[in-house]
Image (cartoon, rainbow, N blue to C red):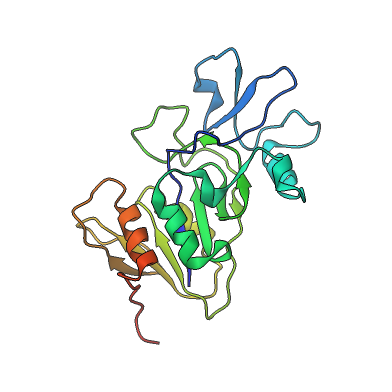
């Protein structure tokens, strides 16, 4: 089994990013045109040209991941980037190669793939420059792989579900989507399972912890 969990807004204080030669910090957002002006910050979209000629910021991320010495890059592995305990619990349970992060800024990446800190979300409550909309163009990473015998489980809210469905469509194995709302998740091509909890905000963290502890088992239909 492999698990895909949506990203989190809260990130570690030591989460790294790129810096320009003039010392400005690069902060990745969904729509830089609407970002506030900050003297020591460059707001950038992941697919904009970077400070290296002919290379986008996304391509810079790929290059950073190609470095043999992980200590040479300030970027953290995706599975370690977020502060909620659910990510570490899943990684201990599955291993880095079976845990994937669905990032609103970068796409679907394996948990040991290093990412810069970013401030991009699908949440409708977010400020305009942070909120990713369907009209925005993103060249999302898609590192999800699998065999026909692999089951893929998604943990996340309805705002992230469409991107999961899009990026996981070519995976040959079965897919299962957990949901918590009173209305069943609309997930064509996937099985669905309700996770019952009184927690409403970020309920998927409790779901992740239950899966990691063995208290919850995905229920796929018999073949």
**Residue sitting at x 35%, y 36%:** 124
Quarter of the picture holding the C terminus: bottom left
Q: Is residue 194 above or below residue 220?
A: above
Residue 82 appears in view: yes
Horizontally, is 154 left or right of 64 in the view?
left
Please provide percent x and percent y for residue 180: 26, 57
The residue closer to the viewer here, 172 or 52, is: 52
Where residue 201 sits, quadrant-wise, is: top left
Horizontally, is 48 left or right of 100 in the view?
right
Q: Is residue 37 above or below residue 211?
A: above
Please provide percent x and percent y for residue 56: 71, 37
The residue closer to the viewer here, 44 or 195, is: 195
Please provide percent x and percent y for residue 172: 54, 74
**Residue sitting at x 52%, y 81%:** 149
Please provide percent x and percent y for residue 167: 53, 58
List the single residue furthest toward the bottom: 223
Where residue 20 sits, quadrant-wise, is: top right
**Residue sitting at x 61%, y 59%:** 143
**Residue sitting at x 33%, y 33%:** 125
List the single residue furthest toward the right: 53
- Report the number of numbered marks: 0
The residue closer to the viewer here, 166 or 126, is: 126
Residue 139 appears in view: no
């Amino acid at each position: 089994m492999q698990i895909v969990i949506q990203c989190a807004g809260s990130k570690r204080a030591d989460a790294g990013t790129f810096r320009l030669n003039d010392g400005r910090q690069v902060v990745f957002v969904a729509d830089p045109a609407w970002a506030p002006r900050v003297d020591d910050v460059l707001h950038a979209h992941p697919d904009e040209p970077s400070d290296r000629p002919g290379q986008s910021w996304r391509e810079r991320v790929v290059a950073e991941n190609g470095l043999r010495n992980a200590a040479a890059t300030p970027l953290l592995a995706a599975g370690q980037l977020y502060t909620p305990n659910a990510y570490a619990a899943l990684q201990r349970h599955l291993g880095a190669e079976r845990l994937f992060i669905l990032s609103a800024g970068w796409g679907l990446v394996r948990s040991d793939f290093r990412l810069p800190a970013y401030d991009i979300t699908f949440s409708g409550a977010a400020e305009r420059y942070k909120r990713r909309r369907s009209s925005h163009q993103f060249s999302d990473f898609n590192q999800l792989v699998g065999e026909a015998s692999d089951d893929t489980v998604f943990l996340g809210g309805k705002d992230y579900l469409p991107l999961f469905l899009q990026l996981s469509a070519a995976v040959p194995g079965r897919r299962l989507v957990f949901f918590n709302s009173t209305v069943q998740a609309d997930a064509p091509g996937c099985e669905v399972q309700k996770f019952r909890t009184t927690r409403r905000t970020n309920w998927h963290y409790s779901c992740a912890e239950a899966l990691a502890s063995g208290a919850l088992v995905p229920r796929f239909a018999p073949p």
